[in-house]
Image: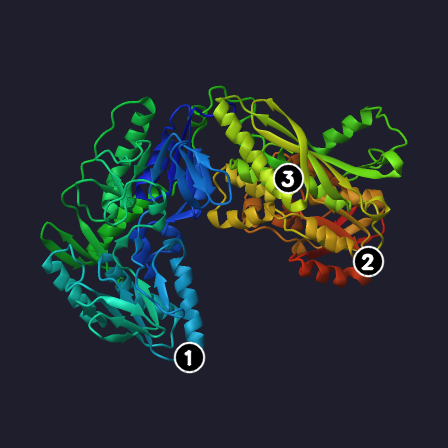
């Protein structure tokens, strides 16, 4: 639990071989007083050494992937998924597209290289780069499926542009992939390279052996002539040849990513960042360039992963030396190294110090090296509490580690506590209150001068993410939801923020990121931020008081359900469980993007679509979960409900996290509602049942609508992009006091 802001900010741009070592070391021994942030375009990193084996079906895709969501969570580091557009060297900040800049005391750039893409091509040319590798298999399979549909039974001709090790491995692996995906097509593969030999940099003996492997597999080569143009169905060469190509895979020599030219740092003659032997860039000693992204001045090294791996320990040490103001270590590259190329058939080509072998044991050796390397980065067990505490001088240890208080709406007090407190209060009221605690709803309505009314609500929580910009956006969306639920239009907001102690520049940055995110969402709602209050406290928190204009008839309450109403839910459940899983390094990368889309989707359009029709009642699902908020509706309306558990939608991954018992700290209090729910024993084991008590941050709307207006409502919601689910209906009250019956 954070109690103070860091003195130092360490930022890794890209999580390739070298930067991944820093993240691994951080997990074992984080630097006191510092925070580590990883910035990446993707929530996963792909190990290039296992891509050919995965393409050939020798590995499952997940075996070659490092889940950055889980690894950063396990290490106690932040992950910012964003696009970098430059560096402000005066302020030492990364410039990010469409979000606040990110300050750093030390920055390590390791975004690799890209295939050369300077060859002209027609708009419809079927050209596909191997990178980004995170999406290569999906892009390849999608292209092949579309091509097969358009050319049933036709022979498929693939050109691999680039005869280096990567291109040769891809060519060897392709037949297995094609056999799995296109069973009714013959395959031709041709490797094209401007040089006279394949796999330059390997010995002649190794090149001859690879040529034999190609000949045995029917893989053709065209060497000694550069590609000059990609056309719709052909590849043109400098010597005048044209080669048929239904698909061109770019595995050409390493080129510098365009971003490197935007960083205002010295470059080598190929566009890579120029460094000295310490891996620090020549233009800014606080910025390191590693792996393919950097070129050491005076050392003509090939762009190979083996060098990036060996740079890792030097970078880790030099980050610490830089923060302490100490001299930096020099990186001494090795003069030779073992080369292993997968040939896609359970064998590999090995070259070392003049020896060349092509056998199954060579692949076994490669497999052992690769899987041992990946095992270091696929261990997602969270770091120990002792390690976590080194980053916070005075951590809060009043709660056991397995019950660390949740953030977002999962961090609210339970409804039972709230009800007991309100029952003990003698709440003052007056005749200006139109909707208040006498009949609690999602927001209050108060009469002001000239008989006009104003709607008001307040929401406040600990940020659910360590990305404070996104947390600010989520806080604004979540706060406004209560007004949308009663049919009011928010107009003004007042902010309340708690900022942990720490250096003034860190406090300023945190507050700026929170409010920058919130203001972005308020601007989209046409809401003015008119004031607020800040204070220092043990951990960051943010909330808003929102004022708004009530809708017709002074708002739509949650108390208007009628017998036979259909119950419609506009968003899936599972936010609370997934956020807890993320804290515990159990939320997979493929679950994060749907979760983020969910959290950043406002209820404004869904509420407007619902209110334009004839609905009975509406509320939003937040901290008390679906069961708690539905019970509020039912109690206020004097009826019961029948829910179809199987119809309740869940976010991707929520079924798995809920089945594993991963739940918010608020869920046990929400489960007190079970006494009013009739459920069969086997149904109580379904993840949808656990989801009834899962607290939702930025949850959807629950709408009651008469049967005759049910389909028009669903159609209106579809018109605004809302895929709503009908989960049940209302019915007469049970004489035993049961309010919800599950079927």
Near-viewer residue (364 or 275): 275
* Label 1–label 3 contact, CB within 8 A: no
The local crowd at label 2, few if under 14, some if 14 to 19, many if 20 or more residues have their Cα within 10 Å, is many
Percent x, y for residue 733? 85, 48
Q: Tell me: 87 left or right of 696.
A: left
Near-viewer residue (190 or 344): 190
Q: Residue at x 61, y 51 (%)?
A: 650
Tell me if residue 243 comes above or below residue 623 in the rendering: below
Tell me if residue 170 comes above or below residue 80 in the rendering: below
Q: Is residue 668 visible?
A: yes
Circle 2 SS class: loop
Q: Tell me: 294 left or right of 6.
A: left
Tell me if residue 168 comes above or below residue 539 in the rendering: below
Tell me if residue 692 comes above or below residue 150 in the rendering: above
Q: Tell me: 280 left or right of 357.
A: right
Residue of label 2: 706
Percent x, y for residue 591? 51, 49
Residue of label 1: 152
The local crowd at label 3, few if under 14, some if 14 to 19, many if 20 or more residues have their Cα within 10 Å, is many
| Separation of marks 1 and 3 at Cα, in angstroms | 52 Å
Answer with mark 2 or mark 3, whichever residue precedes in sequence. Answer: 3
| Separation of marks 2 and 1 at Cα, in angstroms | 50 Å
Quarter where residue 527 is shown? top right
Residue of label 3: 476
Q: Residue at x 77, y 38 (%)?
A: 443
Of badges 2 and 3, the one in the foreground is 3
Answer with mark 2 or mark 1, whichever residue precedes in sequence. Answer: 1
């Amino acid at each position: 639990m954070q109690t103070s802001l860091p003195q130092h900010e360490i930022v890794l741009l890209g999580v390739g071989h070298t930067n991944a070592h820093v993240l691994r070391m951080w997990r074992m021994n984080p630097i006191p007083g510092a925070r580590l942030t990883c910035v990446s375009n993707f929530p996963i990193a792909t190990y290039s050494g296992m891509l050919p084996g995965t393409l050939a079906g020798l590995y499952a895709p997940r075996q070659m992937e490092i889940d950055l969501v889980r690894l950063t969570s396990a290490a106690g580091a932040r992950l910012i998924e964003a696009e970098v557009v430059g560096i402000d060297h005066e302020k030492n900040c990364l410039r990010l597209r469409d979000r606040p800049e990110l300050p750093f005391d030390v920055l390590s750039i390791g975004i690799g290289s890209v295939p050369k893409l300077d060859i002209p091509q027609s708009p419809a040319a079927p050209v596909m780069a191997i990178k980004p590798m995170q999406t290569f298999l999906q892009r390849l399979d999608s292209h092949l499926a579309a091509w097969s549909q358009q050319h049933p039974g036709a022979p498929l001709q693939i050109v691999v542009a680039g005869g280096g090790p990567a291109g040769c491995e891809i060519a060897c692996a392709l037949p297995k992939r094609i056999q799995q995906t296109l069973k009714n097509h013959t395959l031709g593969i041709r490797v094209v390279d401007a040089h006279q030999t394949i796999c330059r940099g390997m010995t002649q003996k190794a090149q001859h052996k690879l040529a034999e492997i190609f000949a045995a597999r029917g893989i053709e080569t065209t060497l000694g002539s550069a590609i000059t143009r990609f056309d719709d169905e052909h590849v043109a060469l400098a010597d005048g040849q044209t080669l048929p190509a239904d698909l061109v895979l770019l595995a050409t020599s390493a080129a510098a990513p365009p971003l490197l030219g935007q960083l205002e740092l010295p470059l080598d003659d190929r566009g890579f960042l120029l460094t000295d032997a310490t891996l620090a860039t020549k233009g800014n000693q606080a910025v390191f360039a590693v792996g393919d992204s950097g070129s050491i001045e005076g050392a003509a090294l090939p762009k190979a992963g083996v060098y990036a791996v060996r740079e890792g320990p030097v970078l880790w040490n030099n980050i610490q030396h830089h923060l302490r103001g100490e001299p930096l270590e020099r990186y001494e590259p090795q003069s030779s190294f073992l080369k292993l190329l997968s040939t896609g058939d359970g064998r590999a080509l090995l070259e070392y110090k003049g020896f060349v072998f092509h056998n199954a044991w060579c692949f076994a050796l490669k497999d052992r090296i690769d899987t041992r390397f990946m095992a270091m980065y696929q261990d997602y067990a969270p770091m120990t509490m002792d390690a976590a505490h080194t980053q916070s001088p005075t951590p809060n240890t009043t709660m056991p580690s397995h019950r660390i208080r949740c953030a977002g709406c999962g961090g609210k007090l339970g409804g039972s506590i709230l009800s007991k407190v309100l029952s003990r209060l003698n709440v003052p009221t007056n005749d200006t209150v139109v909707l208040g605690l006498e009949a609690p709803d999602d927001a209050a309505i108060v009469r002001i001068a000239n008989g006009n009314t104003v709607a008001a609500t307040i929401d406040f929580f600990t940020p659910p993410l360590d990305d404070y910009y996104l947390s600010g956006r989520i806080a604004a969306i979540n706060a406004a939801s209560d007004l949308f639920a009663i049919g009011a239009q928010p107009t003004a907001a007042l902010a309340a923020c708690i900022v942990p102690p720490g250096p003034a520049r860190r406090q300023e940055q945190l507050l700026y990121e929170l409010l920058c995110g919130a203001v972005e969402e308020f601007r989209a709602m046409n809401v003015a931020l008119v004031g607020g209050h800040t204070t220092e406290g043990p951990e960051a928190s943010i909330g808003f008081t929102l004022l708004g204009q009530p809708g017709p008839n002074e708002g739509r309450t949650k108390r208007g359900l009628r017998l036979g109403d259909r119950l419609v839910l506009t968003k899936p459940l599972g936010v609370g469980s997934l956020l807890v899983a993320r804290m515990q390094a159990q939320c997979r990368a493929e679950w994060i993007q749907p979760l983020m889309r969910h959290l950043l989707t406002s209820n404004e359009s869904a509420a407007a679509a619902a209110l334009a029709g004839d609905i009975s009642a509406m509320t939003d699902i937040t901290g008390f979960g679906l069961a708690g908020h539905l019970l509020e509706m039912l109690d206020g309306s004097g009826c019961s409900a029948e829910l179809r558990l199987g119809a309740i939608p869940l976010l991707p991954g929520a079924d798995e996290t809920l089945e594993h018992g991963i739940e918010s700290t608020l869920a046990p209090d929400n489960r007190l509602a079970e006494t009013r729910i009739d459920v069969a024993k086997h149904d109580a084991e379904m993840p949808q049942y656990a989801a009834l008590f899962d607290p939702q941050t930025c949850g959807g709307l629950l709408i009651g609508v008469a049967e005759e207006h049910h389909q028009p409502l669903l159609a209106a919601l579809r018109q605004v992009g809302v895929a709503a689910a009908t989960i049940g209906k209302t019915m007469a009250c049970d004489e035993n006091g049961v309010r919800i019956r599950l079927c």
